[in-house]
C-alpha cells in the first residue's frame, strides 16, 4: 500500500534532512520542494512514491564521500566529433631514393596546436555522477578538459581528486585510468612515469608563458584551482616555469585541464612533465630522503615481525606444541601426548 511505503521511507527522509541542514537551509528547502513535486507527479501517474525519490537519488547522494549536493554540470552539448585537424611536416633532404621514388627523409602528421575552446571550472562543473554512485575511482578526462556532454549520467567521477583517490588507484595508473609507463615520452607528454622519484612525478613544466609582472601570482592562482601547490617558480624572461603539487593525482588532473589553455587570453600554454632537477644539492637531498624512507620501512618491518613472533609464540604456548619461529627442535612429542591423554 502507498501509506505503508511512505512510512518505510520516512526514516530515510528524516536522516537525509538532518544531514542536509549542515549544507544550508536554502539547499534543503530546494531538495524538499523537488521531492514534493516528484512525489506528486509519480502519484498522479500511479507509481510508487518512494521508488525513485527516496531510495535511489537522495540516499545515494547522501552517501557520497565528498558530500556533493548537486548533479554534475553538462559542460558541452552532445555533438558528432569530426576528424582531427592535422598538418604535414616534411623533413626530406635533397638526396633522391630511386628505389622508393622519393627524396630521403620522412613526413610526419602532427596535430595542429590550437587554443582549447573549453575549460574546466571546478566550482561550477563538479557534482555527483552515475560513477560516484557506483563507487568509481577514476575521474572523467573529458570533465578535466571541460567538454563532457554526459553530466550526471557519466560513469566516471566529476570531482577534484585528492590523496584518497591516489591511494585507491595505486602507482601504475593515473587518475583517469590510463596505464603509466616506466619511462616518459621523448617530449615529456603523455601519461607519465612511475619509475622516477615521487617529487618529479608531482612537478609540471610550463612553456609558452607571457612575460608579465604578475606571472607568479597568476600561475599560482590558476593552477592552484586543481589542488594544493607545494612549489611555484616562473622565469618571465624565458617564458617558462614549474609547479609542484602536493599529490600526484592533482598534477595529472592539472596537466590535462591546463593543456592548450591561456592565462592572459592570447598565449597557448605548453604543459609537460618536468625532468629531474640536475642540481647536485637536490640530487643529494633526494638520495638522503630515499635512505631515510628505506630505513623507516625496514624498522617498521622489524617491529611488525617481532610482534608477529610474539603473537605466534603465545598462541603456540597456549596450544602446548610447535612454536612458529622456534623450528621443529622445540617441539616435544611427549608433552603433546601427555596433554592429549590428560584432556
Image: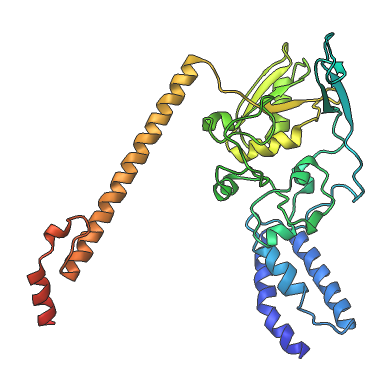
Compared across the picture, whether 61 is left or right of 107 comes to left
Whole-percent x and y of residue 323?
Answer: 19, 60
Q: Which residue: 79% across, 48% down?
A: 125
Q: Residue at x 74, y 16 (%)?
A: 239
> Percent position (x, y) of residue 202?
59, 32
Q: Is residue 227 visible?
A: no
Number of labelled discs?
Answer: 0
Task: Give the colour scheme of this rendering.
Answer: rainbow
Question: Residue extending furthest front?
Answer: 99
> Would residue 231 appear left or right of 8 to someone viewing this image?
left
In the rendered image, which quarter is residue 136 located in?
Answer: bottom right
Q: At 74% across and 68% down in the image, what residue appears? A: 57
Query: Residue farthest to the top?
Result: 94
Q: Quadrant of the N terminus?
A: bottom right
Q: Nearer the viewer, residue 174 or 83?
A: 83
Specify whether 337 is left or right of 224. left
- Which image quarter is the C terminus in? bottom left
Residue 268, position as x, y percentages in the image:
81, 25
- In-front residue for pair 335/33: 335
Can the viewer see residue 271 in this picture? yes
Furthest residue in direction bottom, as rendered? 1
In the picture shown, does residue 299 fall above or below 265? below
Q: Residue 293 appears in which quarter of the rendering?
A: top left
Q: Position of residue 318 (x, y in %)?
A: 18, 69
Q: Is residue 80 above or below residue 232?
A: below
Q: In which image quadrant can residue 269 be found? A: top right
Q: Residue at x 60, y 36 (%)?
A: 181
Amino acid at each position: 500500500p502507498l501509506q505503508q511505503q511512505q512510512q518505510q521511507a520516512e526514516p530515510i527522509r528524516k536522516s537525509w534532512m538532518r544531514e542536509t541542514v549542515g549544507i544550508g537551509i536554502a539547499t534543503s528547502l530546494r531538495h524538499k520542494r523537488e521531492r514534493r513535486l516528484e512525489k506528486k507527479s509519480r502519484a498522479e501517474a500511479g507509481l510508487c512514491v518512494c521508488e525513485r525519490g527516496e531510495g535511489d537519488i537522495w540516499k545515494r547522494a547522501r552517501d557520497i564521500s565528498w558530500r556533493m549536493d548537486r548533479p554534475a554540470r553538462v559542460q558541452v552539448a552532445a555533438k558528432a566529433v569530426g576528424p582531427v585537424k592535422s598538418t604535414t611536416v616534411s623533413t626530406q633532404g635533397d638526396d633522391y631514393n630511386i628505389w622508393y621514388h622519393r627524396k630521403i627523409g620522412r613526413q610526419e602528421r602532427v596535430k595542429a596546436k590550437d587554443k582549447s575552446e573549453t575549460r574546466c571550472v571546478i566550482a561550477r562543473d563538479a557534482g555527483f555522477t552515475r560513477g560516484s554512485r557506483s563507487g568509481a575511482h577514476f575521474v572523467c578526462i573529458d570533465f578535466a578538459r571541460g567538454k563532457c556532454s554526459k553530466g550526471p549520467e557519466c560513469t566516471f567521477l566529476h570531482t577534484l581528486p585528492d590523496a584518497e583517490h591516489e591511494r585507491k588507484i595505486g602507482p601504475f595508473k593515473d587518475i583517469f585510468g590510463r596505464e603509466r609507463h616506466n619511462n616518459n615520452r621523448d617530449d615529456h607528454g603523455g601519461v607519465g612515469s612511475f619509475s622516477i622519484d615521487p617529487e618529479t612525478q608531482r612537478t609540471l613544466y610550463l612553456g609558452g608563458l607571457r612575460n608579465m609582472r604578475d606571472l607568479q601570482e597568476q600561475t599560482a592562482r590558476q593552477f592552484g584551482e586543481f589542488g594544493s601547490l607545494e612549489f611555484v617558480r616562473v622565469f618571465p624572461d624565458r617564458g617558462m616555469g614549474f609547479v609542484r603539487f602536493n599529490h600526484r593525482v592533482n598534477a595529472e588532473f592539472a596537466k590535462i585541464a591546463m593543456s592548450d589553455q591561456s592565462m592572459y587570453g592570447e598565449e597557448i600554454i605548453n604543459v609537460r612533465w618536468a625532468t629531474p632537477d640536475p642540481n647536485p644539492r637536490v640530487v643529494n637531498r633526494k638520495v638522503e630522503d630515499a635512505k631515510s624512507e628505506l630505513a623507516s620501512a625496514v624498522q617498521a618491518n622489524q617491529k611488525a615481525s617481532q610482534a608477529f613472533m610474539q603473537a605466534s609464540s603465545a598462541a603456540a604456548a597456549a596450544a602446548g606444541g610447535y612454536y612458529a619461529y622456534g623450528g621443529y627442535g622445540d617441539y616435544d612429542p611427549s608433552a603433546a601426548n601427555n596433554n592429549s591423554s590428560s584432556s
